Image (cartoon, helix red, strand yellow):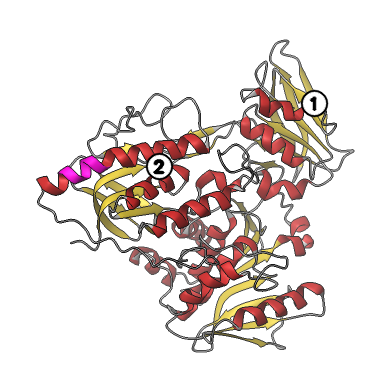
Amino acid sequence: MEKNMYDLIIVGAGPAGLSAAIYMARAKYKVLVLEKEKTGGQITITSEVVNYPGVELASGKSLTDSMRRQAESFGAAFAIAEVKEMNLEQDIKEVHTNKGDFQSLGVILAVGANPRKLGFEGEETFKGRGVAYCATCDGEFFTGMNVFVIGGGFAAVEEGIFLTKYAKHVTMIVRSEDFSCAKTVSDKLSGNEKITVRFRTELIKVEGNSTMKKAVFRDRNSRETWEYDADEDGGFGVFVFAGYAPNTEWLPKALQLNEQGYIVTDGNQKTNLDGVYAAGDVCVKNLRQVVTAVADGAIAATSLEHVVTKLHKKLSIPEFTVIVPEQKKDSDTGNAETNGNTMNSNDTNSAGGVFLDDAVKSQLVPLFDKFQQPVCVRAWLGTDKVSKEVESFLEEFTQMTDKVSWERAEENVPEYLPAMEVINPDGSASGMIFHGVPGGHEINSFVIALYNAAGPGTAISPDNKEKIREMKQNINMKMLVSLSCTMCPELVMSAQKIASLSDNVTAEMFDLTHYPDLKDKYQVMSVPCMIINDDQVLFGKKNVEELLEVLERTNKK
């Protein structure tokens, strides 16, 4: 019974969920954190966090990575799993996921919010081809172009400033009379020659053919419209930062929400259901910042301690065993799991190696022990700089373990070089291919690809496995990514998991920086981008289940 039962299950691994995990685990309770995608939540796409007390400057990812390591050091467990259903109205809560079922005496919902779309004409049509939602992921694609940033809040101002690194000029489009963020934030715009602000203005539509050519704006006072024509400039971008919508549509109907869909809580972060608390951006609150999220998580956890203790006595359940990892050396950064969410390599020289620093290596070595069989990487290399980098990467990577080797290939040369394909232990091709050095966030994808070939591989539901085995049509998926994109690895890992289980599917990752012809051919201005059979173009992250739905529709055509 104890194996899948916990004192507390936290749904969501953003700052609120991580804070709750730290406090509850430190109090010697058994804690499980469930996250559908990646540790860190929305803050991981923020390049600079400058207003978190005591931390002068950090990226969103580095800040939340540190929080996770801290939670793990106290014994909190983490799992990448999508929650499908929850039964929360009884003493023992039931949480059903795509990776199995769990029970707990308490639940904290830290499910966050998703970027809000505005609904202007052409928004969906040009998503990924001029309309974007992440400056960190997509800003580079708009180098030398004029860019319009829609929004007047903190995120809009910060990302607008960030975009000046790439854009020819940034125009802030603000609906209201002034910015909605603190004046100290908006004051950063003053004197910046690359930024213009237009208040009382809204975007009506964008239009064009294969790419955006024109945007139409309206003055909200006079109702007069004006147009921006990009014909002379060769393209432009629209970045939408219009706030977030709470991720609550899928939650149990018994949970009380307000009219906007946010979870209603009391001063202790308790919901209307006993033993169920909520924390972070998903709650009704006036300020949604990292500092308020971690405060919510701490309050929810400490409040739940008393509830859980009483339930142990009421239900005569002995205290659970909590496994606390041994203290790590200063050079270690945490116990990596095969979930693709804790490792991050650099593309520049760092301690330990050219491509993998000591921190990443310390996480990788224990993972290799989980490989059931050795695997090989077959590489097709040219004489170009990137091919030489791939060769150096493979040499450095395979020196860490005898579970992974590599070989140079001369026959059956792929269309795009360099190329690395993971080879199954029996010598057959896995269909999991990488073009370029899988650094940055994509080191996760590369390691998971090896793990899927070596076995046992990442977990997948029996239903999805059966759907993959029933696929008879040949399918090629090209995933165009940026190594700085936090949303790209999920799509890459999902596609390659499918490829690992089907002889009819190939899944190729391309670092778009090195393949401008693909960018131009498919007019890509946002990542992740996926091309199916060199024809169908899709944008945005997708898990295995969502990707199978797309492929099923493709098979029916």
Residue 484, percent from left and from top: 66, 55
Q: Amino acid at mark 1?
A: Glu
Tell me, for residue 41, which label it has, or none: none
Q: Number of numbered discs present?
A: 2
Residue 172, percent from left and from top: 73, 29
Q: Quadrant of residue 116?
A: top right
| Magenta-drawn stretch, dominant element (helix, strand or loop) | helix
Residue 348, percent from left and from top: 73, 65
Residue nearest the viewer, comparing 556 with 251: 251
Residue receiving disc 2: 110
Residue 105, percent from left and from top: 22, 47
Up the image or down, 392 lies above or below 556; here it is below
Check the image and name the residue furthest to the right.
232
**Residue under the image location 20 percent in, 61 percent down:** 2
Q: Is residue 308 magenta?
A: yes
Magenta segment:
305-310
Element marked by disc 1: strand
Q: CA distance from mark 1 to mark 2?
A: 41 Å
Q: Is residue 252 magenta?
A: no
Q: Residues within 10 Å of mark 2 (few under 14, many from 20)?
A: many
Up the image or down, 128 lies above or below 491; here it is above
Up the image or down, 166 lies above or below 72; here it is above
Residue receiving disc 1: 227
Check the image and name the residue furthest to the top.
222
Q: Residues within 10 Å of mark 1 (few under 14, many from 20)?
A: some
Q: Describe residue 182's horizontal placement relative to residue 12 as left or right.
A: right
Residue nearest the viewer, comparing 30 with 204: 30
Mark 1 or mark 2, which has the lower sequence index?
2
Q: Quarter holding the C terminus?
A: bottom right
Q: Quarter holding the N terminus?
A: bottom left
Q: Describe residue 381's horizontal placement relative to residue 453 as left or right.
A: right
